[in-house]
Image (cartoon, helix red, strand yellow):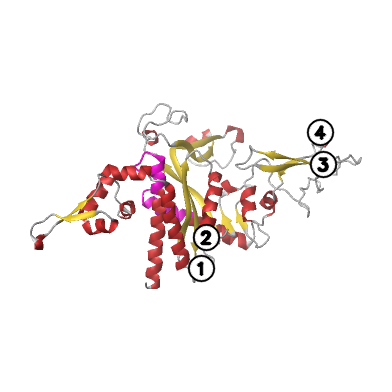
Amino acid sequence: AAQLVKLEEGIRSTKGLCRYLREHPELSWLLGFEIRQSGFIPWRAEFQTCLPLNRHFNRTLREMPNTALQTLLDSSVHLLQAELAEIAPDFGNVVSLDTKLILAWVKENNPKAYVKERYNPDKQPKGDLDCRLGVKRRVNISPDLLTAKSTPKENPVAGSTVFSKNEYYWGYASGVVVTKVPGWGEFTLAEMTQPFNRADISYFFPLMADVKRRLGFRPQFGTFDCAFDAFYVYEYFHSDQHDGFAAVPLAKKGGCKERFFDPDGLPLCKAGLAMPCKFTFTDRTRAIIKHERGKYVCPLLFPEANGKSCPVAHKRWKKGGCTADMPTSIGSRIRYQLDRDCQTYKDIYNQRTATERINSQAKALGIERPLLRNQQAIANQNTLIYVLNNLRALRRIRQRKGK
């Protein structure tokens, strides 16, 4: 509770927290700390708050299990769900997920400090042994454009001369799942903190498990950026009982920009023929989960060659015909078949910005640059930040209702 007061009042250090609690003995008493009268004259009585040392607050934040604070987030979600039951009976039916960079408190993140091999992942900063090096932004840029005053309108630069300029930081990332109630605001359903070298997609299953546990049901729709363009994300929101889907832009990776299927779910070759599955195998390396993949081959050559030639004279015809290697999951088909031009998709995808507004509120509470040097302490403070955001939202709702 004292840590929540520290965040609410914008106090940056635990020393300042102790000073604030000494100056407000009534609040200290409400938080559970003992107070005693120090004056001798009754009408001029003074009260002294009995507080532990400031390093005790630091140790508590560093050693407290995060599961204890997750119960506070559980309660805040349940309170919001009950308060908005009449206004939004489908509270949490549409969710969005994104991550927020958290800069480690180390000199390697200070561009004015001299550090040899600043961006070497094997050179762990001494100021924080838990942080990791990661890439925040990737930009493809041409060397000619570095000195150009404006973008050239003629003589375009060849792609082979373009190099990638990356923006590196040491730190952590906070993943957050948010739901939006139009006209009432955005609310945090789940959050998790990991080192910055973890991929965004690694947050999906742990956070969605927390969302389902807190809401009591699986959300029908989800909206994410292209970092979450994976077959298991589409499969998660697919159900025969409802028309749910994941609104995710198609990431053109692997050289395959589009793929078509027949009514039985078999991929079609360039000639429009259904490709039979030659065999299946278990893949443990190309995704964060173990999954089954199928090898689909040319129907003119398998299971037996029928003597016909490829109708489109495919370039691989002489090498055994075209093939396709893809997961057998229905999510791999939904990934290509999802209608991203329909109005329903656009309405769901527009709610993705809810995470940006929640992260903006968290940034105002100091989530981006914590004065902490330990992953457990940073994770605990992040959980408290999102709890405080939910409590503030709950207060606004009750004030609007006149309670």
Give coordinates of residue 396: x percent, y percent: 38, 65
Q: Nearer the viewer, mark 2 or mark 1?
A: 2
Residue where numbered disc 2 is placed: 215
Say which residue appears at 29% left-offset and 50% top-offset: 11
Q: Earlier in the sequence, mark 2 or mark 1?
A: 1
Question: Is residue 183 among the parts visible in the rendering?
Answer: no
As shown in the figure, which amino acid type bears the numbered disc 2? Answer: Leu
Q: CA distance from mark 4 to mark 1?
A: 58 Å
Q: Earlier in the sequence, mark 2 or mark 4?
A: 2
Most extreme residue toward the left is 41
Q: Secondary structure at mark 3?
A: loop
Give neighbour class at mark 4: few <14, some 14-19, many 20+ (Cα, 10 Å).
few
Work out which quarter of the rendered image holds the N terminus and state it. Answer: bottom left
In the picture, the disc for residue 18 is none
Work out which quarter of the rendered image holds the C terminus and state it. Answer: bottom left
Q: Nearer the viewer, mark 2 or mark 3?
A: 2
Residue 359 part of the magenta segment:
yes
Q: Secondary structure at mark 1?
A: loop
As shown in the figure, which amino acid type bears the numbered disc 4? Answer: Lys
As shown in the figure, which amino acid type bears the numbered disc 1? Answer: Ala
Residues in magenta, as a range = 355-381
Q: Earlier in the sequence, mark 4 or mark 3?
A: 3
Against 220, residue 323 (above or below) is above
Q: Nearer the viewer, mark 3 or mark 1?
A: 1
In the picture, the disc for residue 298 is 3
